[in-house]
Amino acid sequence: MNINDNQSQSIIWTQIERKCLLLLQQRKNSKLSLLQIHAFMLRHSIESNLKLLAKFISTCSSIPFTGILHARRLFDHSLHRTDNFICNTMLKAHVDNRQFKQCITLYQLLRFDLTGFIPDNYTFSSLAKACGLSKGFWEGQEIHNHVLKLGFLSNLFASTSLVDMYSKFGSMNYAHKLFDEMPVRSQVSWTVLVDGYARNGDLITARNIFHQSPAKDCASYNVMIDAYVKILDMDSARYLFDEMPERNVVSWTSIIDGYCNQGDVNSARLLFDTMPNKNLYSWNAMIGGYSRNKQSREALRLFDRLESCSWFEPDTVTIVSILPAVADLGALDWGIRLHCFVTRKKLDRATNVCTALIDMYAKCGEIEKAIRIFKEMPEKELATWNALINGLAINGKAKEALEVFSNMKRNGFIPNEITLLGVLSACNHSGLVEEGKKWFNAFDEFNLKPGIEHYGCLIHLLGKSGCLEEAEKLIEEMPYDVNGVVLSSFLSACGFAKDVERVERMKKKAIEMEPWNDGNYVMLRNLYAEERKWNEVEEIKGLMKKKGAKKEIGFSVIEVEGRVLEFIAGDQMYQEEETMIFFILGNLFLHMTDYGSCT
């Protein structure tokens, strides 16, 4: 077949080829449907159409887990496996699936293949990305050498990819040198260099290069905004955001996420509502922001709005963002509903989703369901074990938590700080003093350093177990400045033990540190009242008034038919239901009276 025949084949497609392409372009292809399409291609002998074959490989590789394996098997047995277009498609598929080692290995195999594969600028783009993301410095140097030998260093696409690769290595001297030697630079080249300096923490150089850039597009601004957001410099981020001539969804989402991370969810929500166009990332950022800032009811309301919107469907990030809000409210009906959605959409294949479900069920008191999900998981990560250990701890199952901890170590997982906090929490909940001290002293064994939260956990355990002298000694010896949480915990333990002498030593510091903490004042007032120290009682009342501390209003949260209702002491929100509530309480009182008279 001559060149003209090849060109005509690439332009004129048969009806069957068009039909096959249409099938591959469908949004939701499954593994089964792709196997059927492959059979269709083989039956009609159209796999020789290289563009169609490349489209099949890229579509197939987008199917999670097994898709890339089938794509690679097809590539390895293809008669066109040395065609540049097909090879580049396969290399890119490996990178897109984060199979960086396989990408580099395939390139090495193709180089030594005698059939004459010749790499081009697209080849080196995928390889540079694979080396950069896998931190393969020596492999990256080898790729750089091949680019140089084959004369692609002057190619804008290849040289920009190398600048990005060295930036990901953290080798900004190499990256900047390559950038300076580029005969032609695009806006992408400038943005890549700015991003490299920003990612490596040199924000001053990043800002200078950003201002030197001859033209700035959305991507350039987004890189700088993201850098400022990461260091919580929201004033600079907002200044650039307001300065942008055009904004895209990434710009809006980045600034929303920044405000959420800073705790300013009101500003974030204002921007979210103002956005001209939203995507699922925007919804996830706002829902996650509410969850992280303990505004759980707002998170659920926003998730409800997302579900009622027909344009987007929740994904794994959405589920992982909303489940902590469910756990925080103890809204079990919501949790069960989300679990059903996850199962129906097959999102439970993701380890982080199952981990979030374990955490949610444990915090809602359904520890058996949490254990069942854990046991059914084909693969577990350290966060999964941590979620179950902590879940068992908060449900008072210290023995089971310690057993899971032992199993985790037997399975080859190395504990981290969160694991040991869960273990100490288990000991704390069940009053296992010796066990708690044993695991606190085991930090060195795992090359870990206890944080203030670990000290706080052990101090609380010692305090409530009556080991006040040991707890006070630990406070004095710990390498951290004592915080309000630790002091309040110890003060409470002293109050419970009626150790007035220790209370006197600690109360001044506790009040100075947290003058608004009503719990400290209430504990001190009650202790002095029990000891009949009425002058001190009046002193505490005066201090409470002077410091502006008010006793926290009691409230309860219940879930009724999927609605989370909050009842606050003295609230008049539910006046219509008040008659019914008192009627039911009256009936309950009668039943209790009858039961008491019968027994």
Image (cartoon, rainbow, N blue to C red):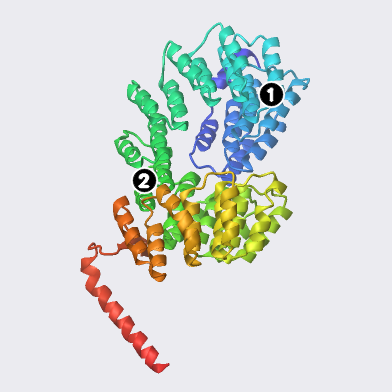
Which residue corresponds to the image point at 47% horizontal and 52% vertical from the top-left?
485
Which residue corresponds to the image point at 42% horizontal and 13% vertical from the top-left?
215
Is residue 100 visible from the viewing direction of this image? Answer: yes
Q: Residue furthest bottom?
A: 598
Q: Quick check: 244 above or below 255?
A: above
Quick one: quadrant of the C terminus?
A: bottom left
Q: Quick check: 481 above or below 330?
A: above
Secondary structure beneath disc 1?
Answer: helix
Q: Are circles 2 and 1 on residues that touch, CB within 8 Å?
A: no
In depth, the one of 130 and 262 nearer the eye is: 262
Left or right: where does residue 277 sit relative to residue 231?
Answer: left
Secondary structure beneath disc 2?
Answer: loop
Q: Position of residue 425 (x, y in %)?
A: 57, 58
Give neighbour class at mark 2: few <14, some 14-19, many 20+ (Cα, 10 Å): few
Kindly indicate the quadrant of the structure image that contains residue 586: bottom left
Give neighbour class at mark 1: few <14, some 14-19, many 20+ (Cα, 10 Å): some
Q: Which residue is mark 1?
A: 137
Q: Position of residue 140 (x, y in %)?
A: 68, 21
Q: Residue furthest top?
A: 183
Q: Position of residue 78 (x, y in %)?
A: 70, 30
Which residue corresponds to the image point at 53% horizontal and 36% vertical from the top-left?
24
Kindly indicate the quadrant of the structure image that contains residue 37: top right
Mark positioned earlier in the residue sequence (2 or 1):
1
Q: Nearer the viewer, mark 2 or mark 1?
A: 1
In depth, the one of 127 and 222 nearer the eye is: 222
In depth, the one of 338 and 285 nearer the eye is: 285
* Three-letter code, disc 2: Ser
Q: Which residue is mark 2?
A: 310
Q: Quick check: 119 above or below 76?
A: above
Left or right: where does residue 256 sit relative to residue 30?
Answer: left
Is residue 5 visible from the viewing direction of this image? Answer: no
* Three-letter code, disc 1: Phe
